[in-house]
Image (spheres, grey):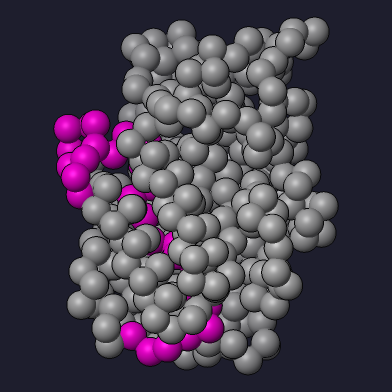
Amino acid sequence: MRILISGVCGFVGSTLARALAESDAGHTLVGFDNFIRPGSESNRDALKKLGVKLFHGDLRAPSDLETLPAVDWVIDAAANPSVLAGVDGKTSSRQLIEHNLGGTVNMLEFCKTHRAGFILLSTSRVYSILPLAALAVEVHQQAFRPALRVSHPRGIGPAGVAEEFSTAAPVSLYGSTKLASEALALEYGATFDFPVFINRCGVLAGAGQFGRADQGIFAYWLNAHLRQHPLRYIGFGGHGHQVRDCLHPRDLAPLLAKQFTAPALPASDRIANFSGGAASARSLRQLTAWCDAAFGPHPIAADPTPRPFDIPWLVLDSAKAARLWKWRPQTPTAAILEEIATHARAHPTWLDLSAPL
């Protein structure tokens, strides 16, 4: 199988490239990256040694894709993944849309030309912010959870947020670029007759992630705690009870192998959640407790000021993925945190590289 990965030198793209290269499935792997993300250059040599053919290109520029070889499948792992992108005063809303949505269009045109299948790595942030922000929650073991004995919106249950939950705006500029990309991908696939899958992922985490306070929070929190960098609990009273799930991207590799050879499926079965689920979920306060035990205590400041698009609890329900693909996450959160901690200890300047203050 000939496979092209966009954003191949990012954390997710490089992790998937390694997993596919080491699978002994005989794949020919090609990747391209514009290397604008701090730290992405660090993955170049390792991928080359695995036989991945690398191209320097920007998916926002159609001409940069003209020299790429024909492939059977494209895995789109390139994106600006911050929910604050375009509104934080540090990034451009136009650049966000050009990258996340315009780049998807360019990749879909590439797939149309080469008759290649397309797999979009999407996000939990396509789900509506207002009902999630208004969700009735309670504190249990230093973490928010949906309040018991309370009626919740359709699509929310103890296992998390399911695919039928609302995707109505607002979902953030970032979320809207991914949601629009999902719709366009399905339309291109139906119109030009090539397979498309939309994999909505929970929070992806692991060693070597380029974590920042607004993205890659598990890696960022552990690295910052170990180095005694200032950390804050933002919003929700400044208590750190807000919760996210956790998934290692290499756990997606067996899924991708099945999707490469899957028969035709209805459009409704081409979208599914992939997450570590409720078992993987941690609050910032729980994450701090883990770090205190692993690295020693580190005081966390409280900042109750709300931040745009923040929500108290977001955990994806992957029951549909289990039903359709027999897929389940393989790496427990404890193992992910240990992996990040081992990497952090071995790379004392990692935050200076990936998340300079």
* Residue at the image point whose x is 33% and y is 36% from the top: 173
* Residue at the image point whose x is 65% and y is 39% from the top: 163
* Residue at the image point whose x is 52% and y is 33% from the top: 167
* Residue at the image point whose x is 69% and y is 58% from the top: 266
Residue 328 x, y percent position in the rendering: 77, 54
Residue 208 x, y percent position in the rendering: 45, 60
Give 310 or 237, whichever is nearer the viewer.
Answer: 310
Specify the quadrant of the image occupied by residue 324.
bottom right
Seen in the picture, residue 183 relative to 58 is either above or below; the reply is: above
Query: For the N terminus, which image quadrant?
Result: bottom right
Residue 119 visible to an observer of this rendering: no
Give 286 or 322, whichever is nearer the viewer.
Answer: 322
Residue 88 x, y percent position in the rendering: 23, 32
Seen in the picture, residue 325 relative to 317 is either above or below; the reply is: below
Residue 68 x, y percent position in the rendering: 33, 85
Give 278 or 151, whichever is nearer the viewer.
Answer: 151
Magenta stretch, main secondary structure class:
loop
Q: Which residues are magenta?
A: 68-95
Residue 199 in magenta? no
Please give left or right for residue 319 compared with residue 307 in the image. Answer: right
